[in-house]
Image (cartoon, rainbow, N blue to C red):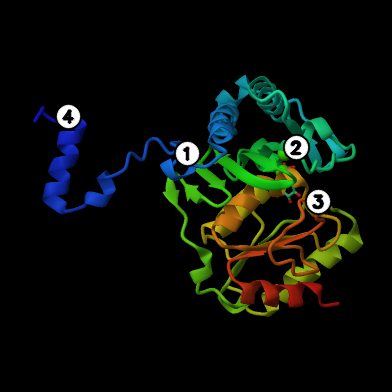
Amino acid sequence: MPPLSKPMATAAAVVAATGCYLLYSRNRDDKSKIPKELLRSPHAAELKLAVRLAKKAGNNMKGYIETKGTSEAMNYSLDIETKSGATDFCTKVDVENESMIMAAIQESFPTHEIIGEETVGTGEIPKLKKDAKTWIIDPIDGTTNFSVGIAMTCVSIGFCVDGHPVMGVIYAPASDEWYMGVKGYGSFRNGVRILQQTSSSTKSIEKAVICCEFGYSRKQHEIDAMLGAVSRILARGCRGIRQLGSGCLDLCYVASGRLDVVYSGIVNEGWKPWDYCAGMVICQEAGCIMESIDQATPGGFDLYSKSILCGVSRQLVDECRVVLTKK
Ligand code: IPD
Ligand code: CA
Ligand code: CA
């Protein structure tokens, strides 16, 4: 047998001394490695490209996040531009990420359609064509977090076939976390399969950590409605309520059981297809329920829905719906 390399020999010695085999059985440095189960799917080529592009876009965000608030931040400028209003803006990194991702997709798959948040801008969002392959891109989700250097921000790349999301990659560069999912093949975090949420023990609000997003609504009557919903959820005795600022990561957190529910869209603060697409595959493959707030739609979530209610169990989602829609 050839001699072990130094790191392997050290690892082997630790395993022998402690029995901690699991700690050393996986190369945790390569969190972007695509699980072999997903490579067997019919969307492996698109998945490989999505991972490569998410990594490049994520790396483009790291320097700014890591230096924010220090003297080294002087090396970065974000060139912020507002979109639908003062609270809704994009940075030059959003635009750079989207142009880079779109150009690479066009080069590899010239017949595919692409819907990108910054390209659509404040215009009408194109509808998914039934007989097409369509990529849906959020070049930075959680731009507000990104702009102030908060780690809850990511790149989200989703892929749809015949009008349905089938593959999703979400990369959070600040925490170096990778989420990948392919319809029918499961979802994974950092290369490890995410457990099915159908076995989640969180079946009531009393036991749940619930996340909501306030989005960009700043009209008083809308604020009152959103806070009214939060108040009703708190009054039901939930364990905690969170507002994390990245819809795509909220979905990943529900998929992997860090959150029990995420909702948004009480009034006009609902999300767009690029906030849902990749996360939808990751959530559904983890057995989560993903519907709109106003109605149960077992088996199908509409990417153009104005609201979302996504949770780890049917009982919990139904209870939240009753509380959230109460007048
Ligand atoms: C936003 C975030 C936020 C959600 C907004 C989204 P962006 O995405 O996901 O959490 O509440 O509705 O627009 O603008 O940072 O990509
Ligand atoms: Ca977004
Ligand atoms: Ca965005």
Q: Position of residue 247 (x, y in %)?
A: 68, 50
Instruction: State which tag comes first along the sequence, 3 or 4.
Output: 4
Q: CA distance from mark 4 to mark 1?
A: 31 Å
Label 3 element class = loop
User: Which residue position is annotated with label 1?
Assistant: 39
Q: Quadrant of residue 293?
A: bottom right
Name the image quarter holding the C terminus. bottom right
Q: Seen in the image, is 273 located left or right of residue 149? A: right
- Which callout, 3 or 2, points to the residue nearer the camera? 2
User: Which residue position is annotated with label 3?
Assistant: 304
Label 4 element class = helix
Viewer-nearest residue: 287 or 72: 287
Quadrant where ligand 3 appears? top right
Q: Amino acid at mark 2?
A: Ala
User: Which residue position is annotated with label 4?
Assistant: 6
Viewer-nearest residue: 70 or 119: 119
